[in-house]
Image: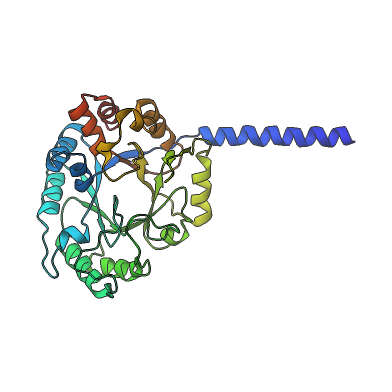
Amino acid sequence: MRILIICTILLLGIGSGYYLSLLNRKTFPIEYGISFNNFHANSLGLDWKEVYETMIKDLHPKYIRISATWKEMEAQDGVFDFQDIDWQMDMAAQYGVKVILVVGQKAPRWPECHIPDWVGKDTDAHEDLLRYVRTTVTRYKDHPALDLWQVENEPFIRFQFGECQNYDSGFIHDEIAMVKEIDPTHSTIVTDSGEMGLWWGAVHTGDYFGTTLYRIVKTNGGRTFTYDWLPAIAYRLKAVLTGVKPGRFFISELQAEPWFTNTNPTNTPIEEQEKTMNPERLKRHIEYAKHIGAQRAYLWGVEWWYFMKKEHGDERYWEIVKDVLK
């Protein structure tokens, strides 16, 4: 009897392991887009308009994500400047590209919180924030390139990064309500960290949910840590458990650039950069995304691909993505 029990347990373990391996190998239809940031392009010593225009014309993405950061839109109290976002939105429309436009205190890229300097640290910025959101949404709600509104960036993450000491995630509910009131036509998306976020708050705040997907990172102490051990089914299971709506699951940031440990990437030697991103790893990340169950993935790193192409004559990353986006 004891032998029978042991054999049964072993068979169940082998069977479940085999079943899990099948689930992990399962692929899902997915479309790829690109997340672009003009500040990051500038930090690499590039002309951001040149990068953006080349991205649109040469890579031919169907989808992009850009940010109308508060600090950029309203550098002076009550004075709005939409010139750069107008240019990006108009070019996207010209080439039939659909845009996720980010609004809020937090937006992709350092310093994470993009709050104007004129907003004092001890100031209640609630009304000022809503004025900026209202003005931005009113301006672009009828723009032909607009696809979705992303409100804030990873607002519910437990461990805040960047310069976000006074960030209040509670503001997002009023922001979402305002976006929906002004623009009932376009849906909203709220994002969270794929590896450190709980997802629940983001999933139940926006119409769509977006997760980051990083496979290799560096700690503040410089130690490299990978998530290569984490199976794709873990993301699918997390989506089910948190109630992600069917057909409304995106990868908002699919890691496709190195993990930089300082705010000036050009200070990091190329050989060091390639420890956390190289052509083979990029291909693996793109392949891995097919197993998540998300409908769309926005590749993170176009500024760096262009930097490698223009400044170092290395077109491998650019060509890999170009082939994926065909």
Given residues 66 and 28, the one toward you in this image is 66
Residue pushed farthest right?
1
- x 31%, y 55%: residue: 112
**189 left or right of 132 in image:** right
Residue 209, position as x, y percentages in the image? 39, 54
Locate residue 133: give its quadrant. Answer: bottom left
Residue 41, position as x, y percentages in the image? 20, 42
- x 22%, y 69%: residue: 119
Residue 201, position as x, y percentages in the image? 44, 62
For residue 248, above or below residue 201: above
Q: How is the image coloured?
A: rainbow
Residue 27, position as x, y percentages in the image? 46, 34
Image quarter where the N terminus lies is top right
Given residues 200 and 41, the one toward you in this image is 41
Locate residue 222: give its quadrant. Answer: top left
Locate residue 294: give its quadrant. Answer: top left
**39 left or right of 215 in image:** left
For residue 222, above or below residue 154: above
Image quarter where the C terminus lies is top left
